[in-house]
Amino acid sequence: MKIRTGLVAITAAGALAVSSCGFGGSGDSGGEGDAGSLDLLVPSYSDGTKALWEGVIEEFEAANEGITVNLQVESWENLESVLQTKIQAGEAPDIYNGGAFSAFADEGLLYPANEVASEETISDFQKSFAENETLDGTQYGLPLIASVRALFYNQDLFDAAGVEAPPTTWDELHAAAQKISATGVPGYGMPLGSEEAQGETLIWFAGNGGGFGDEAEITVDTPENLEAAGFMKKMISDGLTQPDPGATQRTPMLNVFAQGQIGMVYALPQTVGQIEEENPDLNYGIANVPTNSGEPSTLGVADRLMAFKNDDDKQENIRSFMDFFFAEDNYVDWVETEGFLPTTKSGSEAMGADEDLLPFLEMLPSAKFYPTTNPGWNATDGAFKSLMGQLEDQDPQTVLTQIQAKADAA
């Protein structure tokens, strides 16, 4: 699943689509099979993406004489179709920035990560994000950008309701939401509409040691997940959420929070900028996601770089580029400029002075992911979006059994 469904969905709203029929080099273009050239296909995350990559390439080429990097930037809408066309023509990019990778790995089209990046580079990735890039025990992707969710809370509503501190456990969350709801404002916003019911649900499931499974098996109706769904229903039944969670979409709900009309929500790093733009006077805080036990856990999503096996003569040049790009100074500058979170441990340390980002950075190691390498994930994702909203009116076991059946049928 591409990160654009979460983090990038906001930042890419004004993205610049830069389409072309082939790779446009930043220097003299190498011919087909030229070991001195690398083709780089990337999506446009913002209006500045193309210039940002051009800066990286210029510095890389200056430090690596004889290697030319040919850059092609596409809109997210065009990216996958452009890639498929190139693959079918036998002209896959040497390095690709995208989402799902398992199909390419299954077909033997990708280099394992340890063949195109040094051990120093690979060991610097957050363990949770590196593990999300594996298939059958082999890491293929190099996680490029990260997003995790944190608890945003309205400090003024906390003060008015007598809530002394942000909750760290489900029981504390329930108690805080109960006090806030008693003042006439929803204590907690729970979006179970079709936009991102799967995201809200995974946060709760992971907060009880559950999840959606892995590349081998989709697991929905487990005891851990059932207990989490039961607590979600309790929040709804006790009147601690906004009305009709099953019809509530995440984006408009975050707008309501930004206007000071909900006590607590799970939100993204970009929500900080949204609040600054829409209601800079909002008195709010950011804290770790409350879990059943208080142990840290949250939803993570990522995009990645991957390397296609086109010409073995290019392998070392790909390694040089990957190591150069993920070096702390180069990588942190790229991530900060695009407004993302880093996937590397050194990047988190370098960006830790930003108080707005610190809660997100602290949760990166505990991120849990969608099982996007499982062939049944797309059907499962759709089932959550269409069925999880029924939790308000049906018992949790019925809802999870229905979703599990959709996953099994896939």
Image (cartoon, rainbow, N blue to C red):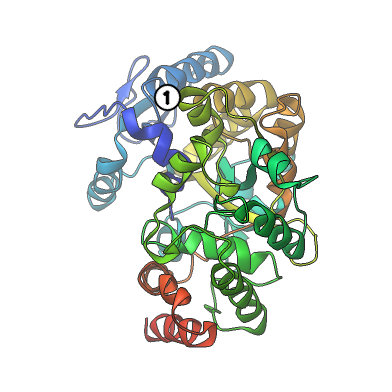
In the image, is 366 to the left or to the right of 104? right
Residue 385 lies, in percent from the top left, at 38, 66
- Residue visible at 69% across and 46% down? 364
In this rendering, the answer to whether 346 lies above or below 108 is above
Q: Residue 370 or 38: which is nearer the viewer?
A: 370
Using the rendered image of the protein, determine whether residue 375 is visible from the camera's viewpoint.
Answer: no
Q: Kindly identify which residue carries mark 1.
A: 69
In the image, is 134 to the left or to the right of 36? right
The C terminus is located in which quarter?
bottom left
Task: Count all numbered tags in the image, as a single digit.
Answer: 1
- Secondary element under disc 1, as helix, strand or loop, is strand
- Residue visible at 75% across and 53% down? 167
In the image, is 332 to the left or to the right of 395? right
Residue 282 lies, in percent from the top left, at 58, 29
- Quadrant in the rendering for residue 134: bottom right
Residue 309 lies, in percent from the top left, at 44, 49
Residue 268 lies, in percent from the top left, at 55, 42
The N terminus is located in which quarter?
bottom left
Label 1: how many residues lie within 10 Å, few (<14), some (14-19) or many (20+)? many
Q: Residue 37 or 271: which is nearer the viewer?
A: 271
**Residue that protrudes farthest toward the front in the picture:** 183
Residue type at tag 1: Val
Using the rendered image of the protein, determine whether residue 351 is visible from the camera's viewpoint.
Answer: yes
Q: Residue 166 or 73: which is nearer the viewer?
A: 166
- Quadrant in the rendering for residue 175: bottom right
- Quadrant in the rendering for residue 386: bottom left
- Residue visible at 63% across and 56% down? 182
